Image: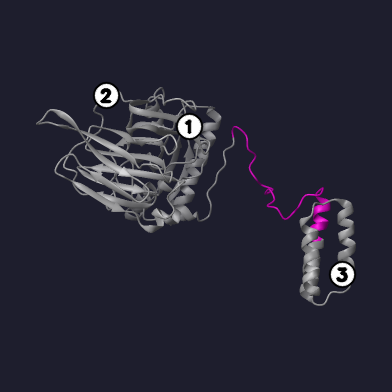
Amino acid sequence: MKKLFLLFIAAAAFALPANSQILKKLGDKIKDKANQRVDNNVDKAIDKSMDNIEDSIKNGGQNTNSNPTPKNKEKENNDVVKHETPATPVAFKTYQNYDFVPGNKILFEDHFSDDRDGEFATHWELKAGQAVLNKMDAELAMLLTDGNYARVSPRMKTEKYLSSQFTLEYDYYHLPSAYGVVLQLKGFDQQLGFDRESDLMVNQSESSFSGAVGNVALNKTYPEALSENFDNKWHHVAIAVKDHQLKVYVDQFRVLVVPDTKEDYTSLGFAGIGDEKNPIVFKNVRIATGGDMNMIGKKFTDAKIVTHGINFDVDKATIKPESMGTLNMIVQILKDNPELKFEVDGHTDNSGNASHNLTLSQQRAEAVKDQLIKMGVDASRLSSKGFGADKPISDNTTPEGKANNRRVEFVKM
C-alpha cells in the first residue's frame, strides 16, 4: 500500500504544471515520503520523478516528458524542404510486392491546384448530373453529388487520346453509404460506327468489369485486409491496360485481372450515382500512355530511364508507398546488371521559387537513393543530384507538360 501511495505522489508531481509553489509543496511531500521508502523500486520511482521536476524548473516550467524538439531539427522556411525517409516505413513493407508501373508519357494530370473550393474543376467537363470541388483533408477533391449517373471527363485536346497501352491512377475516398466510383472506358465499334462503353467499378468490397464486347463480365472480392478497413479513408487506385489485358490495383493489392477485354479504348470518364450526403469522392487523377517498362531480365544498354512513378508528398521529399512498383523495377534492373551504376536525378517543373525547386529536387533524389539502399542496393552504385526546373523535357506552359517535367531519372554512370 505504501508503494502505491508513493508512486501516485511521484506520478502526480510529474503530471501537474510546473508552478514553483506547487513544486515546492510536492517536493517537500516527496522528501518526507522518501524517508519512509521501503525498497529500491520506490526509491527509483521518486528519484525519477524528482529529476523530471528539476528539469521542468530549469526549462521554465515546461513538461519534459513531452516529445522534445530535436536539437538538429531542420528549420522550416521557403527554401528548405523536409527530407523524411523513415528507416523502415511500415507502408513500404506492405507494398514490397507491388508491380504497377505507370506510363512513361503523361497525357493528363490534375491535383485541382488551379481550382477553387465550391466550384467545378477547370480541366474537366460535366457530362451529366452535378459535381463540385470541396476540400477534404486540406486538399481539393471531386465530389459527384447528383445524377444517375453523374458523369465527368478530363478536358482533352482530342476526343480519342488513349493507346493500346495506358495507365490510370487516382485517389478514392469511400463514404460508407456512397455508390462506388465507375470508370467508363469508351471504345469505337468499327462495324457499327458508334461509340460504346465498358464499366469498371471500384467500391468498398470488390472491383468488377462489364465489357461492351464479347459478354466479358468479371468481378473479384477484396482480401479482408483491404475490405475490413476501407471506409472513410483514402485509397490509391491504379489501372494498367496493355493489349486488351486490364489489371486493377487498390493500395498494395492487385484486386482484379481481366485477361482479355476484347476491345480497344479511345477515352475515359468517371461516373456513378451521385448523392449530396454520400457523394463519390476522388482526386489526383493521372492518365499516361505506355507502361510496364519491361526491362527486367534484359541487358541494360540505354543511357537513362525516365520515370514518373516515384511520387512524393506535396512539396516534400517523402516518397509515397505506391512508388514501390517503379522502385522494385529499378532494383531488379540493378540485380540483373551487376556492373550498372546509376545517378539518381530529381527534376521539378518551373512553378514557384527556383532556389526552392533546386533544394526540393536534390532532397527528393537523395530520398530515392536512400530508399534503394534500404532495399538492398549497394551505396557505391548510386549517386544523387537535383536539377530543379533546369532540364525540362516538355512544355512548362501546360498542365500535362509540367507533369512530365516532374520526374526522377536514372542516368547510367
Q: Which mark is residue 33?
A: 3
Q: Main secondary structure of the magenta part?
A: loop
Q: Is residue 139 above or below residue 294?
A: above
Q: Between tags 3 and 2, which lies in front?
A: 3
| Magenta part of the chain | 51-79
Q: Between tags 2 and 1, which lies in front?
A: 1
The x, y position of residue 305, in whole percent, is 35, 41
Q: CA distance from mark 3 to mark 2?
A: 83 Å
Res 334 seen here: no
Along the line of sight, the residue nearer the viewer: 333 or 403: 403
92 is within the stretch colored magenta: no
Res 51 seen here: yes
75 is within the stretch colored magenta: yes
> Tag 3: residue type?
Lys
Q: Which mark is residue 134?
A: 1
Identify the residue at image location x=15%, y=40%: 213
Tell me the quarter of the image containing the N terminus.
bottom right
- Helix, strand or loop for disc 2: loop
Extreme-left residue of the structure: 191
Mark 1 vs 3, N-terminal side: 3
Q: Is residue 207 above or below residue 50?
A: above
Which residue is labeled 2 in the image? 158
The x, y position of residue 144, in whole percent, is 39, 33
> Tag 2: residue type?
Thr
- Helix, strand or loop for disc 3: helix
Please state if 35 lies on the left or on the right of 226 as rendered: right
Q: CA distance from mark 1 to mark 3?
A: 59 Å
Q: Which mark is residue 380?
A: none
Q: Is residue 309 above or below residue 156?
A: below
Please state if 36 lies on the left or on the right of 196 as rendered: right
